[in-house]
Image: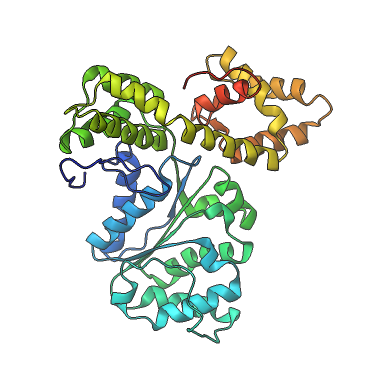
Amino acid sequence: MRRLPTGINPFRPGAGATPPLLAGRDRELAVADRKLGELASGRVPPRGLLLYGPRGHGKTVLLGEIARRSHARGLRAGIVPPSAFRDRETLARRLALLVEATAPRLTGVQLGPVGASVESVARSDQVPELFLRWAGEPGGPLVVLVDEAQTLSVDAGQVFLDAIQLAADEELPFLLVFAGTPDAPRRLRQIRTNSERAFRRLRIGRLHRSDTRRALEEPALRAGRPFTPSGVRPLARRSQDYPFFVQLLGSAAWAAAEHAGRGGIRESSVREAIVSAREEIQTFYLERFQEARSRGVERLLQPLALAMRQSARRLSDEGIRSLLRSAAPRGTDESRARMIETLSDLGVLWETLDGGWEMGIPSFGDYILDRDGPARPL
């Protein structure tokens, strides 16, 4: 847990913002630490890492933490947006610039669009050679972390997958870490059918309730405004163990207690926080609905939300298939399978490890059912 200044709101809602306490991700970080340990010792990890899950679950935060731990071990590391490597020609130019950089410039760099003042004449057929030079430069083994992996072009994706094999063949200490939404594994399979063997895949889902409470209680206590037991319980419940909501509601509760001049965060401040965060949460739901509309599956949302409410917020495979047969009676089995795939890609549906299905965010179903009726409190 990072050091927190006393008296300052410790919670950080926002895309990719590092929370004060990265609770509930010990398993994922332990896997990453083992791979970083291999890399630091000069061994080539046989597989990269793929972190995937619905938006708002902290995948970008985990990439940042893996980058930080890489630097602490003396490794070169940088987070790469896919826009930096949108095709093979762009990739060749980027790599040509990177291999010309000195090791200190590479360490900790955020790799993004290159300024217009820098020119390169690298050709796309030079990519393998350029990559090997980049990975083999002095300055420590290389960790490349790619966010939003589901948006990778076929050309760029093939290069990254080739990179894993190249590193193994040449015994270059290199680790590739991808992060993306639930459709990232499928996207990588489209790029190369055997991609599942190139990565250790880690599902990034909601927190356990005990970790949610830790993520709220420990930062508030360290920053000098602790939760009372009657305050933290309803806030943890309202967050639904969804990391973005934990930070959003925690920040709102802190601000409400500070405005009231209270030393602790009581239930009254929590009630005020739930009201004040409502508009931002509703906007978040609206954006998810608009994504579903753009993918042509919005008509499925209401029957799905109703079925989830009637079945304790969980459906079996057969329950999902039955729902789609009723909601899309003219569809084929193939088209219904694509609907499930799309709902999963969007993070509306999330398949559990034991084969059940839940909403990616449980209260999104309540939002769908309330769109044409009276608003329900969050």
Residue 206 at x, y percent in the picture? 42, 32
The answer to whether residue 240 is visible is no
- Residue at 60% x, 76% y is 89
Q: Nearer the viewer, residue 294 or 308?
A: 294
Q: Residue furthest right?
A: 330
Q: Nearer the viewer, residue 362 or 121?
A: 362
Residue 126, horizontal then vertical, whole percent: 55, 81
Give the image location of residue 99, x and y in percent: 41, 80
Q: Nearer the viewer, residue 197 or 293?
A: 293
Residue at the farthest top position: 310
Tell whether 177 sits left or right of 252. right
Q: Quadrant of residue 231?
A: top left
Residue 233 falls in which quadrant of the image?
top left
Q: Is residue 271 above or below residue 178?
A: above
How many numbered badges does the structure rendering display?
A: 0
- Residue pictured at 74% horizontal, 32% vertical: 336
Q: Residue at x 21, y 34 (%)?
A: 220
Question: Is 327 on the left or on the right of 94, as rendered?
Answer: right
- Compared to residue 260, the image places residue 312 above or below, namely above
Residue 217 vertical placement versus 313 (above, below):
below
User: In the displayed structure, does residue 369 sit left or right of residue 180?
Assistant: right
Q: Position of residue 260 (x, y in %)?
A: 24, 28
Can residue 14 be seen here? The reply is: yes
Quadrant of the rendered image containing residue 207: top left
Q: Of 57 and 20, which appears nearest the observer?
A: 20
Q: Quadrant of the N terminus?
A: top left
Query: Which scheme is used to colour this image of the protein?
Result: rainbow
Q: Residue at x 18, y 38 (%)?
A: 223
